[in-house]
Amino acid sequence: MADPDFRAAAAGARARDEMPTPPRAMAASAQKGKRRRAWPRWTRSAVKAALILVPVLGLTATAGSAWKRGTLADTLDAARESVIQTTGDLGFRLSEILVVGRSETERDAVLDALGVRRGEPILSIDLAEAKQRLEELPWVSSASIERRLPGFLYIRLSERQPMAIWQHERQFTVIDRAGRPLADAAELARRGNQRIDTLPQVIGANAPQQVHTLLSALDSAPTIAPMLSSASWISDRRWNLQLSNGVTVKLPEGTAEMRRALQQLEQMHAASHVLDRDIVAIDLRLPGRAAIQTSATAQLPGWEDESKKKNGKKS
């Protein structure tokens, strides 16, 4: 009698022998799966714990260092210095400074205000402080500064415009529209600056504080403004203008009154070219009136009769 256990064992052997060989891809996948299963099940939990513990340990170490140093601020400063030094070692160092908009400001003045040196870590430069120092320069009205990594500082300057030369106690100082001193006029002349030759002079101890009102009034008198040679601040109350043709214009007190007087003079000149005549002065201090002082050879409109001309005659 046949042994049933033998037949079952034989059938199992034939089934295993007849099973086809798996493809290489399946074999490789099986090997890969075996390798994955080689890691213990607790590995994933350990990685998660490490991701949580490492920052905690770092903060703990920082706190311990801060305790030793006395303050957390000292520790943070030390860490910052370390990072900056590291970036410097990686090549982030100041190599070039590009300045745009500089016309009157001296190059050395810009460098001194920046307070930087070539080769220092560029991230160590305090841009806010450098900007503030630049804007303290006489000629600079505003400044912007930015880093262009790895080693450039890009600076844009906006400079004040010279509007007049203040003459006071034998000193000649270039001032802007607000009356702010910019530079010594004699020094600029020695350096060959030709622009100062075109600037009018203002005379008087407190003239710079009042020059903005005069210039504002002259903006509404486009014919008179280019003719201005100098302006004297009289008795801390009003202006006398000296025009390039030698005529003195006496203006009234008050900004509004001064503006109206200059507009009146504009209209007089447009109608009769009064400023082209041989006159000495025009007094506009009285509202709506103009007193004209003539010279010995004056010839005003309507004064064709030579017998009417008199030296120093006013009208």
Image (cartoon, grey):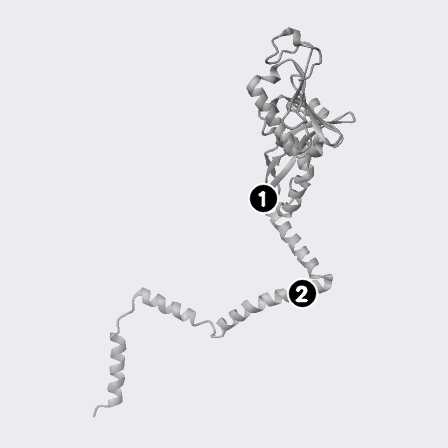
For the C terminus, the image quarter is: top right
Between 92 and 261, the one lying in front of the other is: 261
Disc 1/disc 2 C-alpha distance (Å):
33 Å
- Quickly name the residue at label 1: 147
Q: Is residue 178 above or below residue 6?
A: above
Label 1 or label 2, whichever lies nearer to me, is 1
Badge 2 crowding class, 10 Å Cα cut-off, few under 14, some 14 to 19, many 20 or more, is some
Binning the other alpha carbons within 10 Å of mark 1 as few (below 14), some (14 to 19) or many (20 upward) gives: some
Residue 207 position in % (x across, y down): 72, 31
Name the element at disc 2. Answer: helix
Q: Position of residue 42 (x, y in %)?
A: 49, 74
* Residue type pointed to by label 2: Ala
Q: Secondary structure at mark 1?
A: strand
Name the residue furthest right. Answer: 169
Q: Are marks 1 and 2 in contact (CB under 8 Å)?
A: no
For mark 2, what is the residue? 63
Name the image quarter holding residue 129.
Answer: top right
Q: Which mark is residue 82?
A: none
Q: Is residue 6 left or right of residue 284?
A: left
Q: Amino acid at mark 1?
A: Arg
Residue toward you, 36 or 264: 264
Side of 190 relative to 260 (left or right)? right
What residue sits 63% from the left and 33% below the top? 256
Q: Position of residue 55 (x, y in %)?
A: 59, 65
In this picture, is 77 found above or below 285?
below
- Furthest-bottom residue in this view: 1
Q: Is residue 4 above or below residue 129?
A: below
